[in-house]
Image: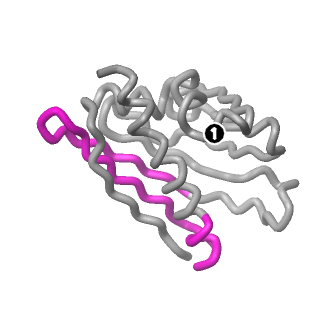
């Protein structure tokens, strides 16, 4: 099994970064490009489910929240829709930890239980692409 580990410093308070990951409207605004027609549903509580869909691109990820400890720790499963080409629908585990660093937030993201190094590399690219958009969304509130 392989793991993606990404650490970033984000120019926003912890509560705002927490909302970026837990508020469906916020997630829909930054996670995937708007050209993909993002649609997000989520029940942010332990055992609650989420779905992040790229409606115009024809793919989605779903999962279950395992731990919800506002505003510092979010643990959830992550699984791509089984009908995506080349996808074996393996469930991985994503842990997001947020730490206040003055006016900024340190984000520590781990995506574990990936089936192969190739899957790790694909997920690393995907997470980095998404996280590259997050500072722009956060800047709208400064």
Left or right of residue 123, residue 109 in this image: left
Which quadrant is home to the C terminus?
Answer: top left
Query: Which residue corresponds to the image point at 42% horizontal and 41% vertical from the top-left?
Result: 74
Residue 93's place in the image compared with 48, above or below, is below
Left or right of residue 81, residue 140 in this image: left
**Quarter assignment of residue 65:** top right
What secondary structure is found at the residue carrying circle 1? loop
Left or right of residue 39, residue 68 in this image: left
Residue tagged 1: 33
| Dominant secondary structure (helix, strand or loop) of the stretch shown in magenta | strand
Per the rendered image, the range of residues in magenta is 93-122
The one of 76 and 98 positioned closer to us in this rendering: 98
The one of 91 and 13 positioned closer to us in this rendering: 13
| Residue 9 picture location, percent across and down | 27, 48
Query: Which residue corresponds to the image point at 39% horizontal and 60% vertical from the top-left?
Result: 6
Q: Is residue 124 magenta?
A: no
| Residue 119 picture location, percent across and down | 63, 71
Total count of labels: 1
């Amino acid at each position: 099994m392989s793991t993606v580990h990404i650490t970033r410093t984000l120019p926003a308070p912890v509560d705002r970064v927490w909302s970026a990951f837990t508020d469906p409207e916020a997630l829909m605004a930054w996670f995937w490009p708007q050209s993909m027609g993002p649609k997000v549903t989520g029940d942010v509580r332990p055992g609650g489910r989420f779905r992040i869909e790229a409606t115009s691109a024809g793919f989605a990820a779903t999962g279950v929240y395992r731990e919800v400890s506002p505003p510092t720790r979010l643990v959830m499963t992550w699984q791509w829709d089984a009908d995506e080409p080349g996808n074996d629908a393996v469930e991985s585990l994503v842990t997001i930890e947020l730490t206040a660093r003055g006016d900024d937030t340190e984000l520590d993201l781990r995506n574990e239980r990936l089936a192969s190094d190739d899957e790790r590399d694909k997920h690393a690219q995907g997470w980095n692409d998404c996280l590259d958009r997050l500072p722009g969304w956060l800047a709208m509130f400064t």
